[in-house]
Image (cartoon, helix red, strand yellow):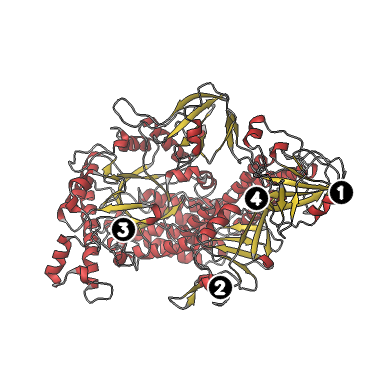
Amino acid sequence: MKIKPIWNLALCFSLLLLCAAEAAYSEPSPASADPPAVTLEDGTAHVIDLIDEGREDGKLSLFTVRSGKQTPPPSLPSRDAIVAGGIVAAKYEGSEFGTYIPPDGYVLSGTGAAAAIVDALRVGDSVTANFPIPALPDRYFSIGGAVVPITQINAGRGPADIVLYLPSYGSATRTNPWGMELTVENGTVTRIVAIAQDAGGNWLDNNSPIPPGGYVLSIQADSPHYGQLNGTVREGDPIDLHTDNESLIQAYKTGYDALNPKTREDNPGGWDDGSNAPFPGHRGADQLIVYDGSYGSSTGTNPWGYEVTVNADGKVTRIGGNDSPIPAGGYVISGHGVQADWLSEHVAVGSAFKLLAEKKQALFLFTPESYLDKGRIGIDAAGQALLDAKRQFLDVDYAGIERELAQAEEGLGALSERIRQGNFERFAEDFAKLAEGVDRAGFMTYESRAVDHRSIWIRPKETSRAQVKEHIAKLAAMHINSIYLETWWNGYTIFPTSNPLAAQNPMYGGFDVLQAYIDEAGNAGIEVHAWVENFFVGVTGMTGPVKGLKPEWSMISRKGDDFQDVPLYSTRYYFLNPVLPEVRDFVAGIYRELLQNYDVDGLHLDYIRYPDAGDYTNDFGFDPYTRDLFKQEHGVDPIELHPGDELWSAWSDLKKNTINEFVYRVSGEAKAIKPGIKVSAAVWPNYERGPEYMSQEPKDWAAKNKIDQLFPMSYHLDAVSVAADAASSVALVGGKSLVVIGVGTNLGLTKEMLLDQIKQSVDRGVSGSALFEFESLFNNGYDSALLAGIYSKKAIVPDRDPLLSVRTIAGEMRRKIEQIYIPMGGIKGGKTYVKELEKLEKGWKDNKSAAKEAAKSIKDIAKLTEGIAGDRYVNEEVKKRMAADLAQLRRIVAVYLSKAAK
């Protein structure tokens, strides 16, 4: 019997029955005495005649996962509708192989007179069953008749999580005591740990070793499955793991707030009554807005959301970002808050989109054909990026990209043929391999610099040198060259300390994790900077000894609290009062001990500020000492002051200058102890508001040459905002510090967005990137994306050895002239520039007159830049490439000169 597609799908599978455990997990039974029925969107109800019992003439049948992965082949003409997530996702008639049954849905099948019921359904209609529909998770394990869903793979174990740890995660799970873990080898449980204490009453971490040929299943105690499994599973029990149960058909529908809103009446929720003006893009809090070409060229939204771009064919071509261009004939669906989260969770590139305007709903469907669309969109995008790279004479692996794309084209053709034949065995898994190659081709079109900050923030949790060595190996493999290791956090050190008001964090059990990092990173050629948090000494449930021993040192809010409420994280932050001389001495003493005993490459200042002021109704600094100090000088108690008052700026200056002076102090003391050390700071990149809002003024630190590197923490979901932070930071330091852009691997960014954020920041003059943070970097797979593209080459730290950096950049420029620009016709007479670059390499020697020679290099770089810009025999794109390299050279030399002049 020929398939007659209605939704342009040939949905059929070879018969695969589910195991008995799966059937037991999802036994359907009517919830009441009413006969099983489905209610359609128009309100009509239809009794189900047969459930997982085949088809009979004139009857309405329903097939669930109990029937397997597809319905039995029809023995008589039938009309079938696939329902996923309570939504009709696809319809077709007849199939010699049967109809695919989604793991989280079912198939309605009508024959004879009942076929009209299915015919009346439309793709996108909602259907409700009055009885439980069995379902299987995308990923699960089955043991003793129980089916247990897996929530994460190779990720940190959060509340109620069930995590699968594979050998690729590392040697051990590194989990805390609050859960249980099953170690599995050859399909059998070989080890079990649960919540337990040692003989001394200390809680024991789960932290199971991960066997090379097996895995560990980690069940957090808040999961309902913890009680189900704890005490019932035994060593030797058989266990089945299923990680490839992903549904090939998904349907999601949600309401939207407005289509092309342009006035207050169009979307009241998109109007800011305070300013009597619309929010950007007329998009309000927790709203979903749909835009088409009649709205304008782009959505105009602010960075705080998530957008999906749909082309004229109704296919999603791009996800993420804001202020998106609106394609001709297409749409942009834009979400904020909960709606941004909904889009991020439910929509993928390749999804089909339908605007259900009469219901004011947005419908997204993902089907086997969507996999092909996603592959085609990715191949075309990578192919265009390759063409752009050639046009721009980028230093990338053209042949490697072409190989990846050729393999992807071949794979896409094979998957298309499998859909035609109805062969879907391991389809999603095979597509994932194809998509990996497509993604890699796209990532490879990003340039990688040989002189570049490749930094990572790490909170160390290791308790053995072997664990540290393992993590260093992972970082070295992806060409990270500098680690910013959290060394003073929550009022604890990570090293054994002799300070009576501090202590090494007990989580290390006496293990000197700092020394282990210094040793192992040094062996790998990676810098280690001590990341310290100054006056920030703890959160709810974890504060260092100083908080309890010296309560009078606490920072106090306007309302008299000794904490800052942080609702976003459901916690409180505790700070010491930096105005107190003894507090400054205490913190500076921690750093002196650190630098006198450990050979770190830098001191990295974080939380070098007051808590943010919020709306100024509960700002900070109102302890008796600080209030008296201000009152003695100005005759006014600062608690009576508010923004706009005559003495408000004086009050703000007292706090700001306190922080500034502490930066001067620790910078000077650090360099006195270790003259070559780098002092850096992680800062909020709102430089206009920061001095008043959180008493942070990095412009002052850079101007006075107190810092060597500035790390703006630019944690945005789009690239435009990050690039703006990069540009403003480079301008702020005025050539006296290098800028390393901080980006968030913990934000759920797409890999493309992360790379684009870094690329656009590099274009604006940063010396490299810093990733926040270690666990999310690897758990979210960003390491492979970075290694394929922006981090593909090994790189040296720009300011570790400025002379080496100059020679390396000049040498790279010569190589590109000889291997890229001349062969590709981008430059004529390039040998002249090769000679000039050779002179630049040799003109600056590491000797007593280095500063003088560096100053001459600045002039030589300017002359070379001017000459290239005016050379009509150099392609305009090549001019941009060479200008960018020379600008990087100039920044490194300028920072070196600013330090040499101190």
Q: Disc 2 or 4, which lies upstream in sequence?
A: 4
The disc labelled 3 sits on which kind of residue?
Leu
Relative to residue 323, is residue 130 drawn left or right?
right
**Cα gap from disc 2 to disc 4, whole angstroms:** 29 Å
Q: Return the residue at label 4.
A: 85
Q: Return the residue at label 2.
A: 267
**Cα gap from disc 3 to disc 2, whole angstroms:** 56 Å
Quadrant where the N terminus is found in the figure: top right
Q: Nearer the viewer, residue 730 or 591?
A: 591
Q: Secondary structure at mark 1?
A: helix
Q: Secondary structure at mark 2?
A: loop
Disc 2 to disc 4: CB gap under 8 Å = no
**Cα gap from disc 4 to disc 1, whole angstroms:** 27 Å
Q: Residue at coordinates 43% horizontally, 75% vertically from top-left?
A: 274
Q: Is residue 852 visible?
A: no
Q: Disc 4 or 1, which lies upstream in sequence?
A: 4
Front: mark 3 or 4:
4
List the single residue furthest toward the top: 236
Relative to residue 204, is residue 438 drawn left or right?
right
Q: Return the residue at label 3.
A: 897
Q: Return the residue at label 1.
A: 112
Q: Nearer the viewer, residue 704 or 745?
A: 745
Front: mark 4 or 1:
1
Front: mark 1 or 3:
1
Q: Is residue 791 visible?
A: yes
Q: Secondary structure at mark 4?
A: loop
Residue 213 % position (x, y) = 54, 26
Does residue 651 lie above or below 206 as drawn? Answer: below
Q: Label 1: how many residues lie within 10 Å, few (<14), some (14-19) or many (20+)?
A: some
The disc labelled 4 sits on which kind of residue?
Gly
**Cα gap from disc 1 to disc 3, whole angstroms:** 87 Å
